Image (cartoon, rainbow, N blue to C red):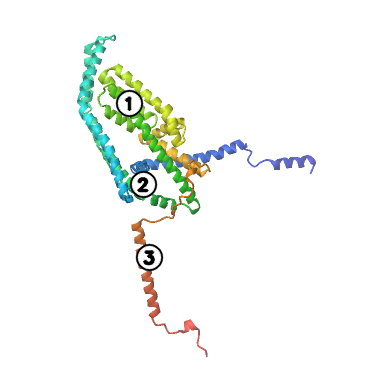
Amino acid sequence: MTEQETSTSVVVADRPAHPVPPSVQAAASWSWRLLLIGAAVAVGLWLLAVTKVIVVPVAVALLLTVLLAPFVTFLQRRARLPRALAAAVALVLMLGVVGGLLTLAGRSIVAGIAALADQAREGADTLLTWLSDGPLGLDQAQLDGYVDQLQETVAGSSQQIATGALSVTVTVGHVLAGTLVALFCTLFFLIDGRRIWAWVVGLLPRGSRESVHQAGRRGWVTLGAYTRTQILVAGVDAVGIGLGAVLLQLPLAVPLAVLVFFGSFIPFVGAILTGTIAVLVALVTQGWVSALVMLVIVLAVQQLEGHVLQPFLMGHAVSLHPVAVLLVVATGSFAAGIVGALFAVPVAAVLNTVVLYLHGHDKFPQLGTGDHVSIRPRAHPVLARALAAAAEAESAVRAERDGDRGTRPADPPTAATHGPAAP
């Protein structure tokens, strides 16, 4: 073999089996991993959509639990109440406060709906007069034809309206059922939440139980900080827009304030959407000047929330940038509508805290690691008693069988067992 042939064979042997650039190999390896992650996320979202009738009430119960847990502990320590009684008292007081707000709003709606209808009718007449006698100079007969056509359209849509009313009735039934599930779960989370958490953590491998438990503690603190801060932000939004409605002497000022309070639990966009209703009420009842003033008030409240409350209060509570909060809300609303927008921020905040702790960054070092919980999987007390009774019955049967064997006479020896007899 010549020197040239030898060098050629060496060069051929040194060539890689797959001449693919390293960048393409890295992109391919990341691509299939991202595809698997995307598939897992899609399956998870599909499961959440299928089980939303249960998942949403349980999520609401967790928010209520983290809100009421400090008060339950206060009643248990200061008033010397049993844990179950303290949880029941806290839940009843919360229902009383929410029921009082809704009752006050309902009475205001009943008292002001007639006046609002009259003012809306007057506003519509004023608008029609302006369209016919104003700078547009529209024909009055043409306007009357449009009004008649609108009335005929509404009258011809009675079937769709009835179907919509039936759908609303079904939705109300689902909401009531979900409310009962949420209250039931809240009560038992307050009473026995620690044991439930211990049982869940105990299902994990033994080596990861303690780290998951400590990460869960920090996620729980983050959820509590978010809930309390969001209530404060919603209260500021409701007071600001409600005072604006009162100063403008708008009807239904109290219901509008209550609506803004509950709508503000969706960060950034909640106050604007509910405040828009106040602007429409001002436009219908008092004209465009009051509507413009109300719009300025709503925008001012939104600026206060976006530039003061969210960056300082909410940013400190959940450690999320306002841009991240806005993107999370948009993603949640796109994926699951209003429910997704409502729960997107707390879920992101808890995941942020948990993932950071599992990767070595503790946002709450003051919590320490001293709070250990018995993290062995335990069965439900009723199931545990049933299993214990079954074990006792099995032991009794085994003991009886062993006793029968001890008292039974031995069988005579046979040639098969002792071999052939000696000659």
**CA–CA distance between discs 3 and 2?**
38 Å
**Position of residue 254 measured from the top left corner of the image (x, y, whole percent):** 27, 29
Tell me, yes or no, if residue 179 can be seen here: yes
Q: Residues within 10 Å of mark 2 (few under 14, many from 20)?
A: some
Name the residue nearer the viewer: 136 or 292: 292
* Mark 2 vs mark 1: in front: 2
Dot 3: element: helix
Amino acid type of the residue tagged 3 in the rendering: Ala
CB under 8 Å between discs 3 and 2: no
* Mark 3 vs mark 1: in front: 1
Vertical placement of residue 132 versus 255, above or below? above
Residue located beneath label 2 in the image: 73
**CA–CA distance between discs 3 and 1?**
65 Å
* Mark 3 vs mark 2: in front: 2
Residue located beneath label 3 in the image: 391
Dot 2: element: helix
Toward which corner of the image does residue 166 lie, by quadrant? top left
Q: Residues within 10 Å of mark 3 (few under 14, many from 20)?
A: few
**Position of residue 22 measured from the top left corner of the image (x, y, whole percent):** 62, 37
Residue located beneath label 1 in the image: 241
Dot 1: element: helix
